[in-house]
């Protein structure tokens, strides 16, 4: 075998590749391969505003040239050499930062925050929250629904905690109560079907109680991966002919210029719930979660008014875990105007009467 000659030539900026010329064939060294492939990944990453980790590039190089690299770690060593991790730079200084970021793995995004925008054809909404399924107050719930029908609402927004999922609570459970929640799914689907029958459009935004089941299942996934995919509450509340829109608990509903949120999205509420949520939202917002009816209006320095409304609950006012409280029953009617402005009619229910 003839002895190879070493040839130098400029490649990728100021760096030089070492190529062995053997029997009229150009054979790339491990460093050359790592530099060429890495540069291609960097160019692609910068063009597409994405990134590729050195580990991923090394795995690709090893798969492409298993005859030259003993394993992925061997390939990764050469990727580190050509990217400057072991003292050499790949690009000129003005491009180095972009190249370095192209070799960092993409950030992990836990939530996909995306508001649900209520279609324009819906003008008047009955907003109810904190029904808590089998813990609902029948008289209060029926009063709210009857009033919504009398006001010709064409939309129902269930603003969180339709379900209770008592069986998945981290707190102690009363077995005499627990048995009633074995039929919670049937109650909820029947109730949603009732609302769809009378109002047409139903939007159900999940609250903190509504996600108890999926969080419970997610905790079990490490032990029983076969149950993955069973967490979606859409399947749980589905009924034949259902058109109910289900909104994730972390996403906001936009009804015109009014933001609808359950309330658990903000940590802490205090006594002045509506006031505090207005300070946090810095925008118009209606919420539940705290089981009290409150209103707060503020004027900005530019003279624009913003409001916050919290609705009362439609569940029992004397639960075992908090028998003495300042809760009240309530709901709201929200009328949306053509320009997105709105009127909130925030109601309390006392003794089956609406105030």
Image (cartoon, helix red, strand yellow):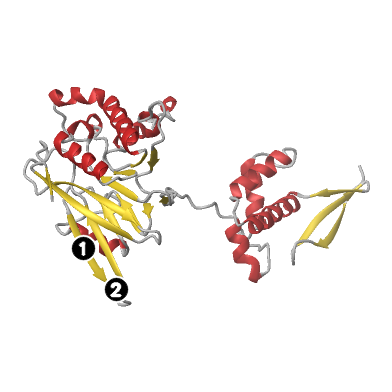
294, above or below 56, in the image: below
The quadrant of the image that shows the N terminus is top right
Badge 1 density bin: few <14, some 14–19, many ≥20, Cα 10 Å? some
* Residue 331 spot, x, y in % from top left: 21, 47
Residue at the (27%, 38%) spot, across then down: 162
Count of marks placed on residues: 2
Answer with the quarter of the image where residue 2 lies. top right
Badge 2 density bin: few <14, some 14–19, many ≥20, Cα 10 Å? few
* Residue 237 spot, x, y in % from top left: 35, 30
Q: Secondary structure at mark 1?
A: strand
Q: Is residue 338 left or right of residue 185?
A: right
* Residue 177 spot, x, y in % from top left: 15, 26
Q: Are marks 2 and 1 in contact (CB under 8 Å)?
A: no
Q: Is residue 88 left or right of residue 153?
A: right
Which circle marks residue 296 in the picture?
A: 1
67, above or below 91, in the image: above
Q: Is residue 162 left or right of residue 50?
A: left
* Residue 61 spot, x, y in % from top left: 69, 44
The span from disc 2 to disc 1 (Cα, nearest Å) is: 13 Å
Viewer-closest of 207 and 127 = 127
Viewer-closest of 38 and 152 = 152
Residue at the (78%, 61%) spot, across then down: 11
Which circle marks residue 180 in the picture?
A: none
Q: Which residue is mark 2?
A: 300
Residue at the (32%, 59%) spot, across then down: 342
Q: Secondary structure at mark 2?
A: loop
């Amino acid at each position: 075998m003839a002895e190879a000659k070493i040839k130098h030539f400029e490649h990728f900026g100021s760096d030089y590749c070492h190529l062995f010329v053997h029997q009229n064939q150009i054979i790339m060294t491990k460093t050359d391969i790592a530099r060429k492939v890495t540069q291609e990944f960097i160019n692609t990453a910068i063009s597409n505003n994405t990134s590729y980790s050195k580990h991923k590039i090394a795995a690709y190089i090893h798969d492409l040239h298993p005859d030259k690299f003993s394993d992925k770690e061997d390939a990764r060593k050469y990727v580190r050499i050509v990217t400057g991790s072991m003292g050499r730079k790949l690009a000129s200084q003005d491009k180095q930062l972009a190249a370095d970021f192209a070799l960092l793995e993409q950030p992990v995004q836990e939530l996909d925050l995306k508001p649900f925008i209520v279609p324009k054809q819906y003008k008047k909404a009955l907003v109810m929250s904190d029904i808590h399924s089998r813990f609902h107050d029948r008289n209060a719930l029926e009063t709210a629904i009857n009033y919504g029908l009398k006001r010709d609402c064409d939309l129902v927004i269930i603003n969180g905690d339709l379900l209770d999922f008592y069986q998945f609570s981290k707190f102690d459970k009363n077995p005499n109560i627990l048995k009633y929640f074995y039929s919670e799914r049937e109650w909820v689907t029947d109730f949603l079907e009732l609302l769809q029958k009378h109002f047409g459009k139903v939007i159900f935004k999940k609250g903190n109680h509504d996600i108890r089941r999926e969080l419970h299942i997610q905790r079990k996934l490490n032990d029983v991966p076969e149950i993955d995919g069973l967490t979606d509450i859409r399947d749980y509340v589905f009924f034949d002919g259902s058109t109910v829109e289900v909104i994730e608990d972390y996403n906001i509903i936009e009804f015109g210029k009014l933001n609808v949120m359950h309330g658990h999205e903000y940590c802490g509420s205090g006594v002045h719930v509506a006031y505090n949520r207005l300070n946090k939202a810095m925008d118009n917002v209606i919420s539940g979660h705290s089981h009290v009816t409150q209103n707060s209006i503020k004027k900005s320095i530019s003279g624009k008014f913003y409001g916050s409304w919290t609705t009362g609950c439609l569940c029992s006012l004397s639960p075992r875990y908090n028998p003495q409280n300042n809760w009240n029953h309530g709901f709201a009617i929200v009328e949306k105007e053509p320009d997105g402005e709105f009127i909130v009619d925030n109601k309390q229910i006392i003794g089956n009467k609406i105030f």
